[in-house]
Amino acid sequence: MKKLSLLLLFPAMLVAQDKAATAPAKQQGKYDTNKFSQMYDLLATPNMFRTASGAPGPAYYQQQADYKIDVELDDKNSRLSGSETITYTNNSPDVLEYLWVQLDQNQAKANTQTSLAESDKISQVLPLDGFSSKYLKKDLERGFNIEQVKDAKGSAMSYTINETMMRINLTSPLKPGEKISFSIKWWYNINNYRKEGGRSGYELFEKDGNKLYVIAQFYPRMAVYNDVEGWQNMQFWGSGEFALPFGNFDVNITVPADHVIDATGELMNRSEVFTAEQVKRYEQAQKSFDKPVVIVTQAEAEAAEKGFSEKKKTWKFSAKNVRDFGIASSRKFIYDAMAVKMGNRTVMAESVYPKEANPLWGETSTMVVAHTLKSYSSHTFEYPYPKAVSVSAEDQGMEYPMICWNYGRPDENGVTSKEVKNGMIGVIIHEVGHTFFPMIVNSDERQWTWMDEGLNSFLEYLAEQELDPNFPSRRGPAKNIVPYMSGDQKFLEPIMSNSETIHQFGNNAYGKPATGLNILREVVMGRELFDHAFRTYANRWKFKHPTPEDFFRTMEDASAVDLDWFWRGWFYSTDFVDIGINDVKQYYVSDTPTTDLKNVKVRKGRFGFEKGPFVYLVSGDNAEVSDSKKKALKVEDFKPLADYVDQTFTAEEKASIKSPKYFYEVEFNKPGGMIMPILVEITYEDGSKDNYKYPAQIWRKSNETARKVYATTKAIKSIQIDPQLLTADIDVTNNSWPKVETKSKFD
């Protein structure tokens, strides 16, 4: 029996093996790859410090650093020396064993990690001064020279310098709620930024030997300590800018007596540093809301620049609740100002510039500052500081609280091209706008450049268009980012990349996020929902330290629009937008089915099948459909349909019957990986048009194709996707039906 059983079983085993050999391989399972997947895998877990809604939590805290600073400018030797007392308050729940101070000037020291980390190659063609500077001249000694660090009692404190970071080694830990005061004495050589580079320094006017100083990162500055990463301890490599705590500043600046200064904060001794007539002009400026008043005239500046005073003068500034401090100083400065109404307050818009910047700056700068304050305030919150200053510094564009440096000057004959003027206007708007992001909404620039540059570039675009609808904005319009989005993927990084790892810094950190926000506003969310959510984010996080998660969550929380798909695609990937028309079929109404429709069953509810009679929509490309049947629908020509309407429609329904005549099925495809709403423009044969917007969720069940049916009273002549170029579609050759042949530039 055993043998028989085995013999009987054996053929069965052979059959089974044969089936296994010929059966197709089982497909492997997959993770959730749907582009509408929620972002729980990417976002930090909400907690008591930062809520799931994107708002500061009940336990949110931030540290405070207050400064009393005395600095002196040695104009002859281009040297800045100073001493400061820092009072640091530990508002965290943590015990701090040491403090970290940033020494950003050290980035320019010889043989730093910064210079060693940069790849270099030979320049085969160099001008004489370029070759001499690079290979013959001894480099200027740069970086901070720390002379002493002392505690409040005057005793020396232990410290350790690591490149651009200095650790203050505390003798006893700083407990929650405690304060500590300590002082630092230092000096450094100021760089000629036009020759040596840098975000600050001096510009030398060789004709008269004068210098125009824009001074920043000039004092040792406290690093940020927060709930996200503890101490911000990433070195300053050059691209990633600064993460700084808020505090109050009292700064005394000693300069040659013939210099004019503007700086962060309010000037506390105006009557001591200006003439009585200049003080009177400033008082006039405080009441002038339509145009600037010149406080230091060009004639006064020209007189000052001819002499080099051996005397000194000290300017005293005080600033409350700021994260940084900037200074502009020169005997060449013309100074004008005007008043800007902010609610119940008056804010001063100011400019300082040399005669070489006129007439452009006198006519334009302060007016643009005033416009920027109004525009940004309308989209975020009322500008809280007492002033905003624009400084003419050629080859510069850099921002600090209440003050910024901006390029753009006429030629030697005082003539300004349209390109230079527009560039200057754009940079003034941008740099003044930075007071909002990140000087008030205080994101970590060292980690996420896009959180200040991208958001600010977006608001810059709005301000430019509000100033002039025809302004040639560089960043913001979707079409402008297409060359970047369609570029070589080897040189593309997601927006959510650290500042130091980006190949195309301007496009990645400025252009793409600005464009993304504009697309959200114009295409995805609509202006009303977007503006409310963006304003909510700005107000939640003004004078605080937001993270990317706080922004993403707030924009959704305040709008009830799920944007995870957008953040995931636009910010966390290098996917691009490419949506096309794959196929268009026209259908005709018939009372007789084609072969493919004869046996089709139509489900009736949950319980059975409809038995007819039926109306058949047959494809125009079906060989069974003769030309005689390809005609517009007239309900009365189809007796069963006409009878049904007559018997079942109410009089009101009959009066409002739509009576479509033409039927089309359009299949859209998506060669690009980035999800986006579909914007469709249909042009009829009579020239009239209809526009449709289908939400991004149309792709949620299929990442490749989507279909829409159009029942129209007029024949369709053409269909166009994204006719106004609002979605950054990288390939418009597939956006039209019938297909439109695009001519090359050689045709």
Image: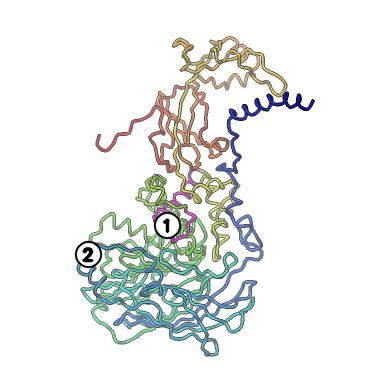
Against 144, residue 564 (above or below) is above
411 left or right of 52 in image: left
Looking at the picture, tell me which residue is in the foreground, 26 or 59. 26
- Please give the range of residues in magenta: 495-523
**x 52%, y 29%: residue:** 708
Q: CA distance from mark 1 to mark 2?
A: 28 Å
- Residue at 22% across / 73% down in the picture? 206
- At label 1, counting other C-alpha atoms closer than 10 Å, the crowd grade (few under 14, some 14-19, many 20 or more) is some
Q: Residues within 10 Å of mark 2 (few under 14, many from 20)?
A: few
Compared to 516, does 291 lie above or below? below
Q: Across the whole image, how many numbered discs are drawn on residues? A: 2
Residue on which the image places disc 1? 502
Q: Looking at the rendering, in which quadrant would you find the C terminus?
A: top left
In the rendered image, which quarter is residue 396 located in? Answer: bottom left
The stretch drawn in magenta includes residue 24: no
The residue located at (61%, 14%) in the rendering is 599
Q: Position of residue 24 (x, y in %)?
A: 58, 30
Q: Amino acid at mark 2?
A: Leu
**SS state under label 1:** loop
Which residue ends up furthest to the bottom in the rendered image? 154
Q: Earlier in the sequence, mark 1 or mark 2?
A: 2
> Does the rendering let one see residue 71?
no
In which quadrant will I find the N terminus? top right
- Position of residue 504 in the picture relative to residue 523 (left or right): left
Name the mark on residue 126.
Answer: 2
- Residue 711 visible in the picture: yes
Query: Is mark 1 in CB contact (under 8 Å) with mark 2?
Result: no
Give SS at disc 2: loop
